[in-house]
Amino acid sequence: MVTANGERLMEGKHKQFDLAPRDIVARAIHEEVLPVYLDISMISKFEERFPTIAMQCKNHNVDLAKGMIPVKPGAHFLMGGVITDHVGRTSLDRLFALGEVAHTGVHGANRLASNSLLEGIVFAREAAEWILHHHRDVRKRELIEQDTRLSQPSILLHELKETMDEFVGMKRTSVGLSYALKLLHPVATDEVDKLDFQSIERANMGLVSWLMATSAVLRKESRGAHYRADYPKQLQEWKQKRILRGIYQDDWVKSQERSRTIFY
């Protein structure tokens, strides 16, 4: 990766240069004043080898002949958010979590390449086999639409996205997170006024955003993708410690190490 001046972006920032952990590279791009580019000039037959990227560049009028593709950090996914057992079961009956969103121990505080393949193949198969064996008589449940006539959403979808990007994104601070929570708390408690996709999606996004922000406030250290500019170092007392949200029965948490868990 190079800047608009042709300088190596990661020069002097990390000993592994462009192969540094994702959070470090992403923050370096984010903090750069000038545009950042991926230098592909040394790759022969780029369009044949990377057709999907080539098509995206073409759709956005990026001239691959120049050998430079503009890059910027983007939102990816939650890493290890929902605690599950070895078959993907959560604390909510009949709700399974699979992949990067699940807290299985495969992912840590940062994304590791190809671990999503392990998550998708291994845990998906385990979950499918368990469901087939235990829930052969499960029938689909119909949603019952209710006329609640609630008020309009307290925050628009694009405002929610902008708030998360600005204050709960790559660089977090106590001041920014506190401001975000003032905006997010109403939307996190909004009820869904009708059972359509857009309403449910927005309600879920608001709740997850609020959970992320409140957890980021509690965790006063930096680790992997969670970066607190006001607490930039890792702290030993936070190592392998997690913040557990929700209501759990004793049989669900009895296997959890309470000394490493903050129930909130």
Image (cartoon, rainbow, N blue to C red):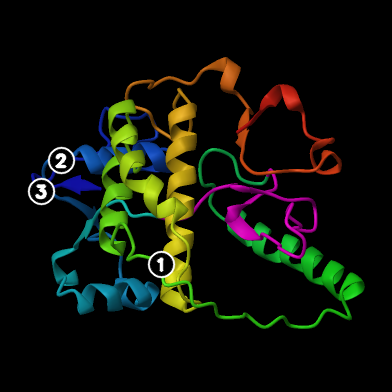
Q: Which residue, as the protein is rendered here, is positioned at the far top?
A: 236
Where is residue 44 drawn, in percent x and y? 30, 68
Left or right of residue 10: residue 87: right
Secondary structure, mark 2, is loop
Determine the residue positioned at 8% across, 44% down: 5
Asked if the magenta segment contains residue 209, the reply would be no
Left or right of residue 8: residue 85: right
Residue 102 visible in the displayed image = yes
Mark seen at residue 4: 3
Disc 3 residue type? Ala
Secondary structure, mark 3, is loop
User: Marks 2 and 3, how far apart in space?
Assistant: 7 Å
Query: Which one is nearer the viewer's eye here, 182 or 100?
Result: 182
Nearer the observer: mark 1 or 3; the answer is 1
Where is residue 156 drawn, in percent x and y? 28, 62
Disc 2 residue type? Glu
Q: Within the image, what quadrant is residue 51 found in?
A: bottom left
Secondary structure, mark 1, is loop
Mark seen at residue 150: 1
Left or right of residue 88: residue 220: left
Nearer the observer: mark 2 or 1; the answer is 1
Mark seen at residue 7: 2
Residue 72 position (above or below residue 49): above
Q: Which residue, as the protein is rendered here, is positioned at the far left?
A: 5
Asked if the magenta segment contains residue 103, the reply would be yes
Specify which label sits upstream in the sequence, 2 or 1.
2
Give the residues in magenta. Answer: 76-105
User: Marks 1 and 3, how far apart in space?
Assistant: 50 Å
Residue 105 position (above or below residue 116): above
